[in-house]
Image (cartoon, rainbow, N blue to C red):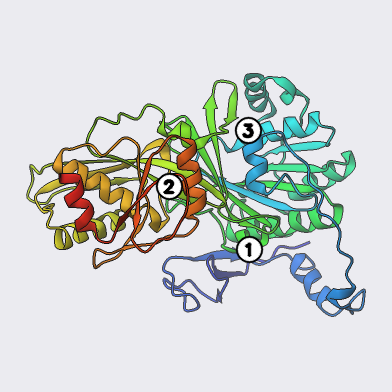
């Protein structure tokens, strides 16, 4: 069968097609997202899709009220944090995408899950497209236990992967990674836009038709998003990001999409010599080793999905040795730090224009929720005044541009977590209404908090 050398150019963000390369996509407005994609062979996937489009539906449509409601079945891996993020375990017939930076531990995590599922009697197939069987065996030896019982297939052709999984009756298939797979029905090297999208779509159809759960490993770009077309995340039922600093022992598994559970759930793992170990009490782990006598340290409570977590925020302000002061933020958006510094200087009278400011969120966590604003402000005020905050104080609240402290949601759960860990007072918005055993100190404006910490 002869090959077709015609190509199209497709936007990796929205999927818009162009006859030639353009720098800016007219569909979504993104720059440098249009990539070349080879057209499928004659009689290949494109032709089959065209033929299927003219077929009549196999079954007539029915009303939703006539659909039988069945209880959702799950396979638990035994890694409590992994099962928690998924919503209770791996769902048969689902497609899960796990993304993360190189070396963060994605392969280790999924190999451990495969070993535990195999040990529980769930036939599992681990497909390695990047490492040889010998390399995976070395990792399995380090993990110990039942990892040696996992069946491995060093293969990158998606047709061979589907045939092998069907032949052995695998109920869980791990593909490491989706960027290394290819299908013969498309031209182009593995990893290009067309190959990644088509392979993911084929594996999704295989999961739905066979009832096997498919877990894909995905690489991330410099921007921190999964490489390949954006439709890759739309195809998957569940999208997980495995995050953390390689210099830290802790890793965070975050759900950004989940059709079978809550979104934004977070699981915490500790990287050890024997693999990843779930952390059952993340708040106590993140606060371990905190020096309460050092200025610039404050604790806030954030909601990660349905779970409250107490996080330490550290701030340091020193005289700048250059014309332009530095603003360095780790675990916090630097633009949010700039806003809070501007609010403190304008509304509370604190001078930061000649100070280098450094803010660090301990444990490798990343603060996204606005409720952590008051904790950042408390750490900055403590650093400027060189006075430590009370060791048993918690700071929860969103800070507006006028300096006002706004209330946040789920205060009862945050209070319960703080009380469990021994905190005795909570600084929060004066407009918040919450009951609990911990006394609340209302704060209406950041200037009030700055004066209180300076006293």
Q: Looking at the picture, does residue 326 appear above or below residue 269? A: below
Q: Mark 1 points at which residue?
A: 234
- Circle number at residue 301: 2
Q: Quadrant of the C terminus?
A: top left
Per the model, the C-alpha gap separating discs 3 and 1 is: 27 Å
Q: Which residue is drawn at 32% across and 48% down?
A: 375
Per the model, the C-alpha gap separating discs 2 and 3 is: 41 Å
Per the model, the C-alpha gap separating discs 1 and 2 is: 31 Å
Q: Looking at this view, is 286 or 42 the one in front? A: 286
Does 194 sit left or right of 221 as displayed?
A: right
Q: How far from the left and from the top, in percent, is residue 52?
A: 83, 73
Instruction: Please identify the quarter of the rendering in which residue 401 is found.
Output: bottom left
Q: How far from the left and from the top, in percent, is residue 147?
A: 72, 25
Q: Mark 3 points at which residue?
A: 131
Q: Residue at x 75, y 23 (%)?
A: 146
Question: Which mark is in front, 2 or 3?
Answer: 2
Instruction: Please identify the quarter of the rendering in which residue 431 is found.
Output: bottom left
- Circle number at residue 371: none
């Amino acid at each position: 069968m002869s090959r077709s050398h015609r190509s199209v150019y497709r936007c990796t963000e929205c999927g818009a097609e162009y006859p030639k390369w353009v720098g800016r996509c007219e569909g979504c407005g993104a720059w440098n997202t249009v990539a070349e994609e080879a057209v499928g062979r004659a009689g290949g996937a494109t032709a089959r899709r065209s033929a299927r489009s003219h077929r009549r539906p196999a079954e007539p449509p029915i009303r939703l009220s006539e659909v039988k409601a069945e209880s959702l079945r799950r396979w638990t891996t035994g890694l409590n944090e992994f099962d928690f993020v998924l919503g209770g375990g791996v769902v048969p017939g689902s497609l899960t995408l796990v993304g993360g930076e190189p070396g963060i531990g994605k392969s280790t995590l999924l190999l451990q899950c495969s070993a535990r599922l195999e040990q529980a009697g769930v036939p599992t197939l681990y497909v390695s497209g990047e490492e040889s069987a010998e390399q995976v065996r070395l990792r399995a030896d380090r993990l110990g236990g039942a990892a040696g019982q996992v069946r491995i297939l060093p293969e990158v052709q998606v047709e061979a992967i589907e045939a092998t999984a069907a032949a052995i009756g695998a109920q869980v298939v791990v593909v490491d990674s989706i960027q290394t797979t290819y299908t013969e029905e498309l031209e182009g090297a593995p990893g290009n836009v067309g190959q990644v999208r088509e392979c993911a779509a084929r594996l999704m159809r295989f999961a739905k038709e066979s009832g096997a759960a498919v877990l894909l490993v995905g690489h991330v770009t410099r921007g921190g998003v999964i490489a390949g077309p954006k439709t890759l995340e739309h195809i998957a039922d569940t999208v997980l990001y495995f995050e953390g600093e390689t210099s830290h022992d802790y890793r965070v598994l975050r759900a950004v999409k989940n059709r079978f559970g809550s979104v934004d759930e977070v699981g915490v793992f500790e990287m050890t010599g024997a693999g990843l170990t779930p952390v059952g009490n993340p708040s106590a782990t993140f606060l371990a080793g905190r020096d309460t006598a050092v200025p610039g340290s404050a604790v806030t409570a954030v909601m990660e999905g349905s779970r409250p977590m107490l996080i330490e925020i550290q701030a340091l302000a020193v005289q700048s040795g250059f014309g332009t002061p530095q603003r360095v933020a780790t675990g916090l958006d630097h633009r949010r730090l700039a806003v809070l510094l501007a609010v403190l200087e304008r509304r509370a009278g604190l001078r930061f224009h000649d100070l280098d400011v450094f803010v660090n969120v301990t444990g490798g966590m990343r603060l996204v929720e606005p409720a952590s604003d008051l904790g950042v402000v408390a750490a900055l005020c403590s650093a400027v005044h060189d006075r430590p905050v009370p060791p048993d104080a918690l700071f929860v609240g969103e800070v507006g541009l006028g300096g006002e402290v706004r209330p946040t949601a789920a205060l009862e759960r945050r209070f319960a977590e703080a009380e469990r860990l021994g905190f005795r007072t909570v600084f929060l918005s004066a407009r918040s209404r919450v009951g609990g055993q911990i006394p609340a100190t209302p704060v209406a404006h950041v200037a009030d908090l700055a004066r209180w910490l300076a006293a």
